[in-house]
Image (cartoon, rainbow, N blue to C red):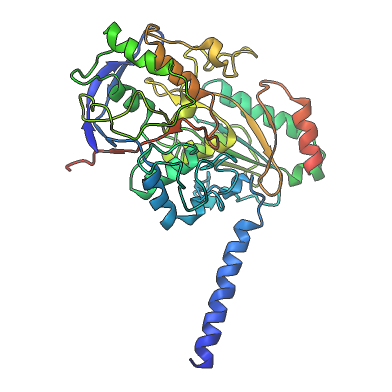
């Protein structure tokens, strides 16, 4: 076996070790182990760890939802107003639609504009239907589509740390959940 | 797989106030639950799903704990017993590796309404009692091998009488019809079993199954919870 071949093998080994290191340096309970793609309101396709390194508030919604989802968005925005500019700059928000059939990037972009959402720090996203069910599973969200196109769903905010490990959940809507807000400040 | 449906049936879950008629498209369903032997073969080619390598997010510590090691069943486990100690994520991965998926609740409920000769035997009190007798049997004994009893109307085995089964939408079952979109502080949250809207309450065995599924998280495993796969019928196939 010549030297070049040995070097090539060694190089391949290093590459494969590096590739596996990325996933294995995440804690076992990190939701970023979930291998799904999300598409945001700009049409950018990313993995669930798009904001890795930042504390992220995750939740689920759908665009045509008449009451709860606007309340969910405004509740997160109310909490953001309790943060200092420096704290706010570090927080990220990812909302995943439970209605991927209808919530295209254009629709998600309209929702973002309507609610004055800071799209540098927030992502409104859709995923393939089978992946939406998996995301709901790691977030502990229950949802069911109804014949009229609406959804029954639980409204849960989930805070994950920079590695994607769930820190705290809140189902207290509307209004600010003080424990949840404290947890955000602690993880910034 | 068995081809089942399309069909219209009344689910025990109420979709909306007073309306529980489900228009179910045709689908394919495994005739048998997945066995220990089949899952061991899956792990052979997908070692990330062995109990030594699985990520804790996807399966709790009970995952495949009845096997003697990560890659061997051992003398106390029958290869033809239904696989149990399996999480929703791992069951989903198994079905996806076969180009399939887990059955959805309505599909499972539709298939499980059949007895040996009838597509929908749920109005027969004797049939309902047979199912209940299984639930009343103490769970301490070893599981029987699959397909020991007669197949049902569709040629599907063991929907009742052997194990509980994961469904794709296990986390969609107990969302109450009146829990959506109202403004009150108590109502914007999902209200849980107390707000459940259920029809056909005489069908107690199916309601128990829904309550059990609703209590699960996707990483949970138990010694009497298994699964089988389902698939869509491709257009023109």
As rendered, which of B202 and A30 lies closer to the eye? B202
x and y percentages locating residue B42 in the rendered image: 40, 51
> In this picture, is B84 found above or below B115?
below
**Residue A64 in view of the camera:** no
* Residue at x-position 75% and y-position 46%: A89
As rendered, which of B203 and A48 lies closer to the eye? B203
Residue at the extreme bottom of the image, as rendered:
A2
Q: Is residue A63 left or right of B101 when viewed as pictured? A: right
> In this picture, is B205 found above or below A138?
above
Q: How many marks?
A: 0
**Residue B91 in view of the camera:** yes
Quarter where residue A29 is shown: top right
Looking at the rendering, in which quadrant would you find the C terminus of chain B?
top left
Quarter where residue B16 is shown: top left
* Residue at x-position 57% and y-position 26%: A69
As rendered, which of A61 and B46 lies closer to the eye? B46
Residue at the extreme front of the image, as rendered:
B75
x and y percentages locating residue B229 in the rendered image: 34, 38
x and y percentages locating residue A18 in the rendered image: 61, 68
> In this picture, is A148 found above or below B66?
above
* Residue at x-position 74% and y-position 34%: A80
As rendered, which of B21 and A21 lies closer to the eye? A21
Quarter where residue B25 is shown: top left
x and y percentages locating residue B205 in the rendered image: 40, 15
Q: Is residue B168 left or right of A74 when viewed as pictured? A: left
Looking at the rendering, in which quadrant would you find the N terminus of chain B?
top left
């Amino acid at each position: 076996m010549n030297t070049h071949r040995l070097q090539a093998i060694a190089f391949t080994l290093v590459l494969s070790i590096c590739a596996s290191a990325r996933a294995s340096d995440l804690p076992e309970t990190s939701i970023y182990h979930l291998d799904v793609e999300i598409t945001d309101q700009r049409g950018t396709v990313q993995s669930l760890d798009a904001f890795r390194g930042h504390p992220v508030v995750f939740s689920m919604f759908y665009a045509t939802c008449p009451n709860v989802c606007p309340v969910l968005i405004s509740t997160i925005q109310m909490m953001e107003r309790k943060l200092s500019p420096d704290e706010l700059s570090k927080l990220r928000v990812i909302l995943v639609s439970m209605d991927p059939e209808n919530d295209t990037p254009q629709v998600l972009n309209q929702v973002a504009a309507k609610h004055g959402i800071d799209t540098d720090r927030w992502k409104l996203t859709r995923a393939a239907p089978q992946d939406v069910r998996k995301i709901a599973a790691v977030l502990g969200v229950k949802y069911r589509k109804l014949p009229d196109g609406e959804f029954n769903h639980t409204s849960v905010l989930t805070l994950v740390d920079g590695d994607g490990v769930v820190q705290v959940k809140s189902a207290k809507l509307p209004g600010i959940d003080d424990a949840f807000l404290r947890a955000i400040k602690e993880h910034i | 797989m068995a081809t089942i449906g399309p069909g219209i049936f009344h689910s025990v879950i109420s979709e909306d106030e007073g309306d529980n008629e489900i228009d179910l498209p045709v689908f394919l369903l495994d005739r048998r639950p997945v066995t220990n032997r089949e899952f061991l073969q899956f792990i052979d080619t997908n070692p990330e799903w062995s109990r030594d390598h699985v990520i804790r997010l996807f399966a709790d510590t009970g995952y495949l704990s009845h096997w003697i090691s990560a890659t061997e069943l051992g003398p106390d486990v029958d290869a033809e017993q239904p696989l149990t100690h399996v999480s929703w994520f791992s069951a989903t991965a198994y079905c996806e590796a076969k180009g399939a998926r887990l059955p959805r609740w309505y599909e499972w409920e539709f298939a499980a309404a059949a007895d040996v000769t009838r597509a929908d035997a749920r109005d027969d009190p004797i049939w309902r009692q047979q199912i209940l007798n299984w639930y009343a049997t103490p769970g301490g004994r070893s599981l029987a091998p699959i397909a020991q009893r007669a197949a049902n109307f569709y040629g599907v085995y063991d929907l009742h009488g052997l194990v509980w089964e994961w469904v794709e939408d296990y986390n969609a079952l107990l969302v109450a019809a009146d829990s959506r979109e109202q403004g009150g502080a108590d109502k914007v949250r999902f209200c849980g079993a107390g707000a459940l809207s259920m029809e056909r309450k005489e069908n107690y065995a199916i309601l128990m199954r829904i309550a059990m599924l609703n209590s699960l998280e996707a990483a949970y495993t138990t010694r009497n919870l298994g699964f089988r796969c389902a698939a869509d019928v491709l257009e023109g196939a």
